[in-house]
Image (spheres, rainbow, N blue to C red):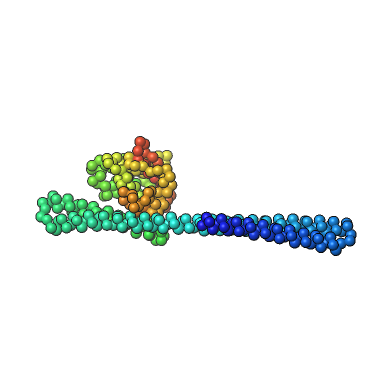
Amino acid sequence: MTILFGYILLQFLWWEFLLVKQNGLIIDEKQKLTELASANETQLKIDIAALHQRKKMQTVMIVSEGTVFLLLLLFGIYKIKQAQDKETVLNNQQKNFFLSITHELKTPIAATKLQLQTLQKQKLDPDTQQELIGNALLENERLNVLIDNVLFTSRLDAGEYKFKKEKHNLGELTEATMSRYYKREIATGQVKLNVEPGIYAVVDTDSFPSVITNLVDNAIKYSPGKKEIVVALTLNSGKAVLSVSDSGCGIANADKEKIFSKFYRAGNEETRSSKGTGLGLYIVNYIVKNHNGKISVKDNLPAGSIFEIRLHVA
């Protein structure tokens, strides 16, 4: 693309130079003919001055029209390059998505299959059986959440999902969501809740829990080792503030504005150790915007990230 652009630019400038030169030669020949045909010296000077003026005007016209054409050509090349870059990014995102979704689907299926095969082939005590069944159910729930995210994203993009918002106790919704999906993490102290009572907001109770689960899933995923995750709901300056903070690996400044894009994940899918599809934060951002809210991310000192959502209270 760069070589082609350089070639076109040089050819265009060369053609413009030739046109200006040819125009000058034509005017010069007309001047010679005028000098031979005219016997009146005064008229000759007037005619020569007119020819020089015409030469100047035609040169300006050629250069001006050429410059406009060149600018239009450059703009067209820029738009083509922009579209090409966008297509390349999209292809890379789709490639990464298919790589990650394949891994995400295979992992819970393989884990569930292994646990069920163990139950089928071995005689185990009731406690071990219950543990394996519980693990299989957790893997099944994980698979269900993944499929829900993919289907939900498809419905959002197609404009098929209709938000049914109503006044609701945001504290109760947050606690119910956390109790349903993260009972084990709360019991072990990996996740802590700090919810102020009596905070109401107009929300869609079908979609808003996805905001909480996606943020908490990310916090767990990107917090290697000991996890210190805090889910808080507070009232600040007349706004309901829902925050999820962790002490994990954090987010680079260059990625903070990109992480809410569909399929975007920092790094390369083939070398990235953490799991995910790049849909979670896209869904969170979409839902928050449709609730007239704002989401932001900032560093959590000394390590980790804080995702903060601000909503109007009802």
Return the residue nearer the eye: 205 or 56: 56
Q: Quadrant of residue 196?
A: top left
224 versus 129 height, above or below: above
* Residue found at x 83% / y 59%: 47
Q: Position of residue 63 (x, y in %)?
A: 67, 56
Residue located farthest toward the top when viewing the structure as drawn: 302
- Tell me if 160 is positioned left or right of 61 in this view: left
* Residue found at x 24% / y 57%: 109
Res. 183 visible in picture: yes
Return the residue nearer the eye: 262 or 310: 262
Q: Position of residue 245 (x, y in %)?
A: 34, 41
Q: Position of residue 65 (x, y in %)?
A: 66, 58
- Tell me if 144 is positioned left or right of 289 in this view: left
* Residue found at x 42% / y 43%: 253
Q: Position of residue 125 (x, y in %)?
A: 10, 51
Q: Quadrant of residue 113?
A: bottom left
* Count of numbered badges drawn on the protein: 0
